[in-house]
Image: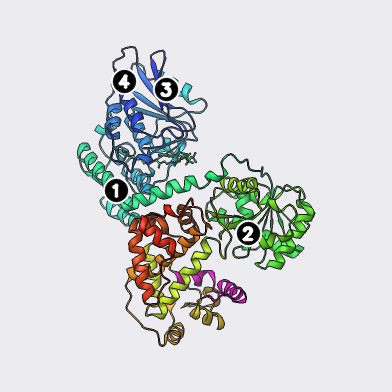
Amino acid sequence: MTLTIAREGSVAVVTIDNPPVNALSQALRQALVGAVVELDADAAVGAVVLICAGRTFIAGADVSEFDKPPQPPHLPDVVACIENAKKPWIAAIHGSALGGGLEVALGCAYRVAVPTASLGLPEVKLGIIPGAGGTVRLPRLIGPAAAVDLVTGGSPVGGKKAEGLGLIDAVIDGDLRAGALAFAGSLAGKPLPQPISSRAVPAVEPDFWESVEKAVAAKAKREVAPLRALASVRKASETGFSGAMAFERETFLELRSSEQAAALRHVFFAERAAPRPPELAGITPRDIRSAAVIGGGTMGAGIAAALRDAGLPVVLIERDAAAVERGLDNVRAIYEGSAKRGRMTQALADERMAGVDGSDDYGLIADTDLVIEAVFEDIAVKRAVFEKLSAVCRPDAVLATNTSYLDPNAISGGVSHPERFLGLHFFSPAHIMKLLEIVPTAVTAPEVLATGFALARQLGKIPVRAGICDGFIGNRILKVTRAQAERLLLSGATPSAVDAAMRTFGLPMGPFEAQDLGGLDIAAFQRKAARERGETPFAPVADRLCAIERFGQKSGGGWYDYQPGDRAPKPSEAVAAIIAEEAAGRSQRAWDEASIADAIVLPMVNEATRILEERVALRAADIDLVKIHGYGFPRWRGGPMHYAEARGLAEVAAVLDRLSAEGLAEPPCDGLRRAAEAGSFSVLAGR
Ligand code: 3H9
């Protein structure tokens, strides 16, 4: 970390250089206080420009310090020191001014920013609230309503919007340093502005706080931080500055050591580690400048849109002209939907669509860098596609399969130069869902694997390496989730009780509602294939529902009944009768929400531990990312592995032992018992 001071006439330029993101480490906080003292004492200095080297302004407090006790100087004191400086400080912002970074800027007398800058208070996304005056100064500067939006939503605003809100004083087009110096020059002879801390908060409508509280609570569900952030902004509007600062700080410190904050920090760092696995360090990926997708169904169209959204030209290949048209229609529907929902302008949607070519001629992709196959889940069909691709594509083109369940080793059997082949498992809808499972075969070259990770970065996805097994990481765990949900039905729980319990746990939807939405037929098809392989998948009730063509919402009924035109699930007497028949002779018990969640989540953890032991996943945190980004596991719980560790692995093993004694789950696997002894999954990873 360096903080340097340069002179430009009577303006001092304080430059922070603390890579990668100029986070406010203890050393930087100390250096800032030192700079204020030094420049206050220098009679030749009339104004101070605070600017940052590298890609961004201060991106916030140093999150890696949050596991330790706070060290002085504390950030609120640093901000107060800048605000009380004898000379006006001007924050010159590029990149991100987030969290503590924006709070430092709020201590400055003025703020200027380039149009591409982003400014915000994302603390709620880390399970905390701003801790250095963000909730107290912001309503004084931009009014309570705009402050509530920024603080409780956590999303940043761009430079222009910030200017409109009054968050910054000027947008600087062109060179930021020169623009900030000119701004400083224009202040000569003017009195210092009133510090934000001594300004009044504009009044609000009488029912303002009650109505925003309802809206914030509805959105936050069980996340704690947004409502606490709102309470802090409200306090700032209803009490004096110092009382509000004390309230904010107390809340910040309490939440900083909360379980939700620890979980959200875990996910924050896991997401940043995922795109750069240490085992691929130093390996150069192949360049991907063009792409093709084979198969224009829901999955293929979504993948094509994801590739287009990353700026790649895409060719969509189907088997005949009619199928090409259907495929292109599927992609067009995605872009029409995006434009209709305001996610992009019509012009941008048209431009994206214009970059998708459709054809039934494989010859068109002879020079394409990356081809992703997304045809029907049938090994013979897939192998035939790769035979054709082997014949037409450049030998260094990367070839990928989007299979969910088939063995990529078997699919790639006939591929020429098989080292350029890998699995890229997208999740539906592929242009939206962030997860990408990357599945190397036994012979995938390291640089091809690295290309998969580079592609994920290009597409803005979270990549996780998965080994080969039935369902890879995510769907293998999903099978356990579903089997456990059925076990519960056979021992006294109802579909609605199970779904409600899992929603209370934090999932957006329960397992039965989710199956009704997605359709029961796909899993039935997979179970049929598993039985042909000699396996014995457990789905007695689902099998019976499929036998009478209750496939879910699309067939008017599945686990629930549906009225025509209404997606609201209604408990079904027919399903209850089937459950009763299947449950005959089994012991029944009462289930509460917590024990339902345990009977589903802890067996998921057990299976995930096997996955870790078998090195199908390399890190427990990777499994957390898969479940959060592919299956809606609540982020604030940190993923199943973090949840289990936070709860205590010994307790997890004990609950599984109890469930297994009742025949309701498998006993803890050896790995889980070892991890329970050590208190952490780290004994299993990195072996
Ligand atoms: C806060 O400020 C609380 C205060 O109110 C109260 C204090 C009292 N700390 O994301 P990237 C690392 S809470 C430590 O890939 P990008 C990151 O781990 C904070 N490290 O880059 C990664 O390390 P590595 C409020 C951080 O260009 C590297 O920087 N602020 C922090 O895609 C690059 O990160 C936030 O929540 C940090 N705060 O995106 C902002 N931030 O290379 C969080 C990043 O070793 N950060 N790192 O893997 C971001 O949103 C993005 O990092 C940013 C850059 C947009 C800045």
* Mark found first going from the N terminus, 4 or 2: 4
Quadrant location of the N terminus in the rendered image: top left
Look at discs 4 and 2 and give the one toward the viewer.
2
- What label sits on residue 402 in the rendered view? 2
* Mark found first going from the N terminus, 3 or 1: 3
Q: Is residue 358 left or right of residue 77?
A: right
Residue 52 shown in magenta:
no
Q: Position of residue 88 (x, y in %)?
A: 33, 22
Look at discs 3 and 1 and give the one toward the viewer.
1
Label 3–label 2 contact, CB within 8 A: no
Cα–Cα span, label 4 and label 2: 60 Å
Q: Position of residue 508 (x, y in %)?
A: 43, 63
- What label sits on residue 87 in the rendered view? 4
Dot 3 crowding, Cα within 10 Å, few <14, some 14–19, many 20+: many
Q: Position of residue 544 (x, y in %)?
A: 52, 82
Dot 4 crowding, Cα within 10 Å, few <14, some 14–19, many 20+: many
Q: Position of residue 307 (x, y in %)?
A: 62, 50
Q: Is residue 262 above or below residue 63?
A: below
The residue beneath circle 1 is 255
Cα–Cα span, label 2 and label 1: 41 Å
